[in-house]
Amino acid sequence: MSSPPAQAPGPYPVRRLTFSYEGDQVRLVSEQLVTMIIPPSHSLDSLESSAGFAFILKDEQGVPLYGRVIPSPIRFDQEIFDKDPKRSVRREVNPRPKGTFVLLVPGVENARRLEFFGNPLKPRAHLESPRRLASFTLEPLPPR
Amino acid sequence: MGTSDGQVVGITKIVDHGDPSQRWNLVILSEGYQAAQLDQFHTDAQNFVKTMYQTPPYDEMWCGINVYRIDVSSTDSGAADPVACGGSGYAPHTYFDATFCGDGTIQRLLTVNDGTVHSVVNAQMPQAHMSLVIVNSTEYGGSGGSVATFSLAGGADEIALHETGHTAFGFADEYCYYQGCGIDVGHDHYGGGEPGQPNITADSNRATIKWGNLIAAATPMPTMSNPDCTQCNNGANPVAADTVGAFEGAGYYHCGLFRGQYACRMRALGNPYCAVCQQVIRQTLAPFMPSWVYGTNTIGAGQTQDWWLWWPGYPGFEVIGVQAVTPGDELRTDSPGIQQNPDGSTTYFLSVINPGTSDVAFHFRGSAL
């Protein structure tokens, strides 16, 4: 079993990473280093092969350090809400997938890459095999 | 259009449970409020905070949550209402460019420029975990994604609670259709891998299902199957409403994916979060809970205890809250209430429920500003 490294109990450095996307092209546009607590890592065992979407922080050797499963922030579909209680919520394909999102990962010194895994970046891809979707190199943290 | 159509006025902490570096921080931003309307936004934000506090399990985890309000004024009031979706054609100048018909075809899709929202939040509150935008319109609408957006229409705050489930806690949708029952093609059987999200599964085996700790030994597995996978299963719940098990139909598929309870806010708006989602919310927010404990008590199996706390002032949404001493022990709360007394003091109420078959020790929490 591969379990995530234990996080410090108190506030610690966290990278606040802002991404933008248009279609399946995702770009890391800015980064802030802040002191805070973030939710604990999910089990790293099966994140790369899970259906859905996951982001994983890795070190230079590709060893996972932290990861979480989230709904895909790259919106190839979007949720529609209605007052009709029989259909209060549903999905529609997004004709213009474009936007911005933020991810929070621990600011650990040996982290070198952030990778996205999940179903392909296109509409209604729930049944297609999960794969690596994108990879970003992280700059070394400034000296403390 | 955009940031030239208003300004960021300032940020105010409206629920203060301590240093933001140690708490889960929610940010609520205004959109489509003119400067003279920001007092109304303060009331609207406070109303949402009250709704959230009264939503289990946020009530019992409240001491771990800060809420910030970012006042952003706009030149004009409201949101765009394009004629393309049958709207009036109203096109106000607002800071985040809120518009109904956000995709050009669906009127109730109320969107904002999420890049501008993130820019403001990154600058004003970089320790934020979640951002919500309240749009100054009484027309029903909202949207999700990295920023949850909702209007002032009755019931639209349910959109914010549903989207918070996605964005903050990683929940999947639990409804068994994509566009709608009887409309979808290709959503009869799920044939993909095990979903990573914590609240749906392809595994209905009692021994291995993700939320097995919540399933009673007597509960049949699967608890509810869909007899006709070409249709949504809208049959009656075969078990008691609070039963946790494996109910077929979830994650946009009629069959092959299971949810933990018959009803849940992630399945249809207006329901509470199911026990599975509540457990994940508690686990996610646990690291943010302050360590100040008023006392410890034990509640017997199947019992309910009513608690109250009197405070000599009205410091905001201070609460009583409870947390099981042993992580994983199930404990529920109900009927949270706040009463502002004529003498200026405040009384808080909370019922503590132990639905399990063993006694549970719990911490009784509270914090003062």
Image: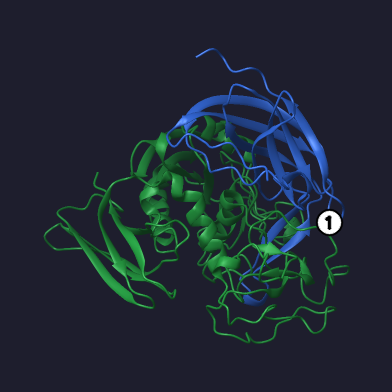
Judge by depth and name the residue closer to the eye, B108 or B53.
B53
Amino acid identity at mark 1 = Arg
Residue A93 falls in which quadrant of the image?
A: bottom right
Q: Quadrant of residue B18?
A: top left
Q: Is residue B316 above or below residue B362?
A: above
Secondary structure beneath dot 1 equals loop
Q: From the viewer's perspective, tell me whether residue A85 is left or right of residue B138.
A: right
Residue B145: x %, y % from top left: 65, 49
Q: Which chain is green?
A: B
Q: Residue furthest left?
A: B343
Q: Indicate the chain coloured blue by its letter.
A: A
The chain that hosts pointer 1 is A
Residue of label 1: A124
Instruction: Tell me the crowding category of disc 1: few under 14, some 14 to 19, or many 20 or more residues within 10 angstroms, Cα based.
Output: some
Residue B194, image x and y in percent?
Answer: 76, 58
Residue A116 sits above or below residue B227 on the image: above
- Quick one: B182 or B34, which is closer to the camera? B182
Residue B20 visible in the shown view: yes
Tell me the residue at 54%/24% (across/down): A33
Q: Can residue B1 be seen?
A: no
Task: Find the residue positioned furthest to the front.
Answer: A1
**Position of residue B207 in the picture relative to residue B361 (left or right):** right
Picture coordinates of residue B1 (x, y %)?
63, 36
